[in-house]
Image (cartoon, rainbow, N blue to C red):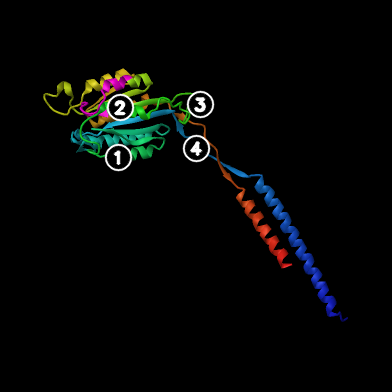
């Protein structure tokens, strides 16, 4: 049976139209479903590890005068200068204070902020490790160093941005001041600044560094003024420590770590991964395919 070619062409055309219609319907439904799913905002909740939080703010004020070059400390069986020993113990102390907002002040002839208070303890430890003698002079301005540290621990801060501190509460603040000399530079008296720290509610922990002090100096220059540092700590409600060796320095760091302890795990923050871009991309592709099929028709 011979069928006219015109009828065969019309039949094939009808079949193509029907298939094209089914494809358009499938693309339309895919577009609609993908768009609804994308607008619903699907997301995946990822597990998060709880971080330590203490609500404490600590400023380390470190003497960087010329006497820190003296080689009278031992480290790993070798004789090193005081600054090297302080860097080794101090960086380890800072890294252990995860959860604290911690900063670093350097003082000699002048005082400056080497690291602004931050929760990034690794960056503060790196700033301490990069400290160089002579960058701010070679004298010892203890009062100015403490004063700048107190200024960065703003007492007007309600502590709302500190980890582990509830809104309206004040964060616990402390200054750890380390010196191996006597105050012979700057414009402020150390004892007066320590009295100000007490008024602000900021404890000052002082560390007298060096094998000899002014009480048994026997005419030796540039020895540590232990009495003044002790008076400063007592005036502010803190504690004074005496360090003659590297082992003493390690024990003092551990003692301060315990005194300013009380860290606990903060409530973990859930990490969410948004999934809406995937159905949104599928909807976009479906819309493009639908538009292309209509143009082809």
The residue tagged 4 is 49
- Which circle marks residue 41 in the picture? none
Mark 4 and mark 1: span between their CA atoms? Answer: 29 Å
- Which circle marks residue 129 in the picture? 1
Residue 14 appears at what percent x and percent y? 81, 69
Mark 1: few/some/many CA within 10 Å (<14, 14-19, 20+)? some
Judge by depth and name the residue closer to the eye, 286 or 216.
286
Mark 4: few/some/many CA within 10 Å (<14, 14-19, 20+)? few
Position of 16 with respect to 99 (left or right) is right
Mark 3 and mark 2: span between their CA atoms? Answer: 28 Å
The residue tagged 3 is 167
Residue depicted at 71% across the width and 64% down the height: 293
Dot 3 and dot 2 residues touching (CB under 8 Å): no
The residue tagged 2 is 146
Residue 200 appears at what percent x and percent y? 38, 21
Q: Which residues are magenta?
A: 176-195
Residue depth check, mark 4 versus mark 1: number of the one nearer the observer:
1
Dot 4 and dot 3 residues touching (CB under 8 Å): no
């Amino acid at each position: 049976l011979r069928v006219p070619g015109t009828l065969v062409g019309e039949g094939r055309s009808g079949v193509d139209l029907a298939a094209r219609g089914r494809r358009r319907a499938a693309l339309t439904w895919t577009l609609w479903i993908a768009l609804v799913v994308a607008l619903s905002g699907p997301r995946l909740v990822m597990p998060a590890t709880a971080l330590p939080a203490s609500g404490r703010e600590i400023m380390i004020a470190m003497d960087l005068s010329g006497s820190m070059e003296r080689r009278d400390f031992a480290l790993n069986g070798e004789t090193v200068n005081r600054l090297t020993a302080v860097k080794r113990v101090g960086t380890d102390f800072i890294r252990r204070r995860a959860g604290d907002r911690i900063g670093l002040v350097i003082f000699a002839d002048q005082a400056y902020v080497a690291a602004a208070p931050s929760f990034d303890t690794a960056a503060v430890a790196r700033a301490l490790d990069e400290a160089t003698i002579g960058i701010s002079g070679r004298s010892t301005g203890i009062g100015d160093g403490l004063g700048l540290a107190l200024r960065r621990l703003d007492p007007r801060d309600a502590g709302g941005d500190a980890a582990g501190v509830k809104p309206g509460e004040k964060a616990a603040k402390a200054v750890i001041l380390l010196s191996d000399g006597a105050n012979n530079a700057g414009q402020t008296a150390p004892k007066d600044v320590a009295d100000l720290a007490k008024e602000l509610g900021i404890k000052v922990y002082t560390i007298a560094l060096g094998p000899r002090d002014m009480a048994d100096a026997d005419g030796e220059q540039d020895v540590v003024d232990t009495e003044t540092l002790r008076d400063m700590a007592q005036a502010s409600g803190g504690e004074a420590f005496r360090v003659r060796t590297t082992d003493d320095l390690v024990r003092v760091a551990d003692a301060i770590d315990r005194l300013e302890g009380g860290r606990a795990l903060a409530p973990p923050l859930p990490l969410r991964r948004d999934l809406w871009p995937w159905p949104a991309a599928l909807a976009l592709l479906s819309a493009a395919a639908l538009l292309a099929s209509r143009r082809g028709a």
